[in-house]
């Protein structure tokens, strides 16, 4: 008999589980890997199966919001995106933003969505926000296909810089997952948070060079964008994919450090508040 | 498990206290603060015992293969205790030790993953219990056959009825290799045939594993469990051999079956008034109903004729209605009934009866019992209507 799941547990008020530490949490979670793998695999299949609108949604969500911003910024406000057409610019940015939006919001709400199982079964709760990331990756994959198609249509040149786009993507994943952990942990105390969260995400969209290029921001204000770890991520994404350059390595490095800290602290905070889920919600 | 010694306790609950944290204010700042305080206290062992505990000093241990029933009123802490055993919640104080794999029964309309089908949920459950794919495939057909929900097994569980869900959940649970299964009220959900089947399955499982069963159903518990713990407001009130504890429990239940028989008389459109004195009726005027008759009082008495408020199961109840009317030659008709205060259901009524001789001091009416299920305490209302013909 393969004994994958730890078979003895001791729960005390003054509990070792809370002091297990980062490594201990990860070791515990690793034992449940088959559970996680099956969960993610099945969810993705269910989502993209022929009877589901999942695939359409994955494609249309970034495209629809792109169309709105295309109207506002290209026809009404006329934002300059340099040599790149705004349509191409916005779709490229929106695909990544949709991914970020989803891992933060669905990650935060994954606890409440799966409350039934949380109040009954013991398993590493971090699987729920993590599963959201895994599912969102599929959406992102379809998103990149759209980007590729757009590149072909516009005859956009391929550059070696495009390979660097993996860096902002990884940093964004870490940052988004960290935020997802923090907000999911907070939902145990502040359930209304999920009502406020979309607004917060929407606000951060405007404070980040997603729908406009960082070059459209007046240089005096640009320095303020340093405090926003999302700004270099999206700037780097756009530069590498669209402009064939990479000038934001310094700020992006800072973002990377910040994101890793957010992810680690977010995870630890989540693990500390996870005992409240079954009690509070 | 092979390395498990027979003498070792599989479940050990030591002086467990559980208190749910509640938020006083709805403001976000408060809530965040409280959450942080709670987490800090948890890690600094500063949590101090306060008043409202869901579980108070609960201790018990279970040997492998034992079958334990948990019984008690709603809110007595049964489900909380189950959550502690399942490992989804921490005790505020004390220690819970569980040796072995625990399989909680997902009862009442909840699967692991609502988007997935019943079959996929069974697979999911198997991975959670540490079975690999070949072991899962070995038993999946057995599980599906036992659940017996036909083609629904390949439909997402969000479309299941609660009965179907509990069938699948139950079937999966008893076929797992879990060392301990926790069953919370699931027996009541399935229909009769499944009930019989599941009871048999549990009995078979008992040979191999340890079971903790929560139920209100005394009969099921008596059939399945060898030992019962009676929880009363979070405390262990009795712990011992099943028949004995269940007997004590039902005794106490029956003691309060017709607890606080609240005597009140009712006229056509006046509300019944409460009366504090035991068994004492309520003075009423029924001018709106028939001005010629006045109900002076309605009293609830024991068989000995003394006013009483509580009645045991199967005990005689005397309802004394005192009426006064002007015309001694008239015939009186009367309705006397007993109504369940909670459900508003009529427990017993004698409707529209003629009191034959007006000069008679005592008229006897026979109350016929309607469907009265005496498995919990009931508060009743006694009412009387009278009119001349």
Image (cartoon, rainbow, N blue to C red):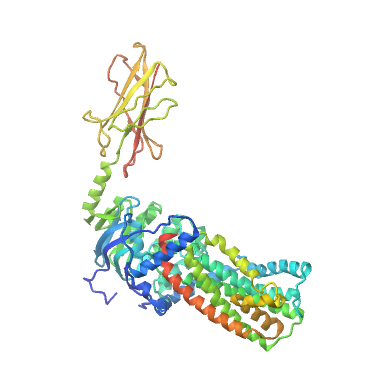
Tell me how many marks there are: 0
Please say if B382 is above or below B3.
above
Picture coordinates of residue A261 (x, y %)?
50, 78
Residue B312 shows in this picture:
yes
Residue visible at 62% across and 70% down in the picture: A98
Considering every residue shown, the one lying at the far bottom of the view is A160
On the rendered image, what quadrant is the N terminus of chain B found in? bottom left
Name the quadrant containing residue B267.
top left
Residue B175 shows in this picture:
no
Picture coordinates of residue B164 (x, y %)?
45, 57
Picture coordinates of residue A106 (x, y %)?
55, 67
Name the quadrant containing residue A239.
bottom right
A207 relative position to A186: left or right: right
Name the quadrant containing residue B201.
bottom left
Picture coordinates of residue B356 (x, y %)?
33, 17
Please say if B214 is above or below A238.
above
On the rendered image, what quadrant is the C terminus of chain B found in? top left
Residue visible at 41% across and 37% down in the picture: B344
Considering every residue shown, the one lying at the far front of the view is A220
Residue visible at 74% across and 73% down in the picture: A87
Please say if B227 is above or below B135.
above
A244 relative position to B147: left or right: right
Between B180 and A135, the one lying in front of the other is A135
Between B303 and B134, the one lying in front of the other is B303
Between B356 and A268, the one lying in front of the other is A268
């Amino acid at each position: 008999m393969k004994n994958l799941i730890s078979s003895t547990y001791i729960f005390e008020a003054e509990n070792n589980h809370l002091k297990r530490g980062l490594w201990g949490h990860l070791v515990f979670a690793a034992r449940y890997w088959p559970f996680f793998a099956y969960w993610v695999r099945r969810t993705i299949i269910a989502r993209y199966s022929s009877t589901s609108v999942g695939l359409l949604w994955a494609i249309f969500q970034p495209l629809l919001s792109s169309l709105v911003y295309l109207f506002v910024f290209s026809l009404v406000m006329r934002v300059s995106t340099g040599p790149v057409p705004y349509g191409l610019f916005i779709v490229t940015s929106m695909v990544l933003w949709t991914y970020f939006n989803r891992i933060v919001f669905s990650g935060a709400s994954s606890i409440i969505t799966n409350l039934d199982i949380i109040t009954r079964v013991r398993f590493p709760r971090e699987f729920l926000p993590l599963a959201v990331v895994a599912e969102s990756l599929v959406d992102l994959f379809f998103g990149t296909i759209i980007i590729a198609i757009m590149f072909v249509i516009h005859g956009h040149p391929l550059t070696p810089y495009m390979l660097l786009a993996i860096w902002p993507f990884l940093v964004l994943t870490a940052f988004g997952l960290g935020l997802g952990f923090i907000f999911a942990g907070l939902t145990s105390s502040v359930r209304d948070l999920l009502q406020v969260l979309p607004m917060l995400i929407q606000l951060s969209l405007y404070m980040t060079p997603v729908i406009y290029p960082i070059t459209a921001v007046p240089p005096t204000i640009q320095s303020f964008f340093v405090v926003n770890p999302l700004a270099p991520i999206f700037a780097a994404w756009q530069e590498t994919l669209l402009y064939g350059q990479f000038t934001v390595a310094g700020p992006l490095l800072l973002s990377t450090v910040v994101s890793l800290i957010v992810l680690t602290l977010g995870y630890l905070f989540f693990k500390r508040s996870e005992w409240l889920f079954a009690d509070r919600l | 498990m092979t390395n498990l010694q027979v003498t070792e306790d599989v479940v050990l609950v030591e002086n467990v206290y559980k208190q749910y944290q509640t938020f006083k204010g709805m403001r976000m700042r408060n809530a965040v603060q409280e959450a942080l305080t709670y987490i800090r206290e948890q890690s600094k062992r500063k949590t101090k015992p306060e008043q409202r505990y869901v579980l108070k000093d609960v201790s018990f241990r279970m040997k492998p293969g034992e079958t334990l029933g948990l019984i008690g009123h709603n809110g007595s802490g049964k489900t909380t205790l189950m959550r502690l055993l399942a490992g989804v919640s921490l005790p505020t104080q004390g220690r819970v030790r569980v040796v072995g794999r625990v399989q909680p029964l997902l009862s009442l309309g909840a699967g692991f993953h609502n988007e997935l089908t019943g079959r996929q949920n069974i697979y999911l459950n198997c991975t959670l219990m540490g079975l690999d794919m070949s072991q899962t495939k070995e038993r999946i057909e057995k599980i599906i056959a036992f659940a017996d929900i036909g083609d629904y097994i390949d439909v997402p569980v969000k479309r299941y009825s609660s009965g179907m869900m509990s069938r699948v959940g139950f079937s999966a649970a008893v076929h797992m290799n879990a060392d301990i299964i926790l069953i919370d009220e699931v027996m009541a959900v399935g229909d009769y045939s499944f009930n019989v089947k599941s009871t048999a399955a549990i009995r078979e499982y008992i040979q191999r594993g340890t079971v903790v069963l929560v139920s209100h159903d005394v009969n099921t518990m008596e059939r399945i469990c060898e030992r019962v713990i009676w929880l009363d407001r979070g405390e262990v009130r009795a712990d011992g051999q099943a028949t004995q504890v269940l007997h004590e429990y039902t005794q106490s239940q029956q003691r309060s079956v017709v607890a606080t028989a609240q005597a009140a008389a009712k006229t056509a459109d006046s509300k019944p008034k409460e009366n504090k004195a035991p068994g004492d009726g309520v003075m009423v005027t029924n001018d709106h109903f028939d001005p010629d008759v006045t109900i002076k009082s309605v009293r609830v008495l024991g068989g000995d004729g003394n006013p009483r408020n509580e009645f045991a199961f199967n005990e005689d109840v005397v309802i004394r209605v005192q009426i006064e009317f002007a015309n001694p030659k008239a015939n009186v008709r009367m309705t006397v009934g007993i109504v369940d205060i909670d459900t508003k259901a009529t427990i017993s009524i004698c409707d529209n009866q003629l009191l034959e001789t007006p000069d008679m001091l005592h008229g006897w009416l026979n109350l016929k019992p309607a469907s009265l299920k005496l498995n919990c305490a009931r508060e009743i209302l006694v009412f009387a209507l009278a009119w001349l013909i």
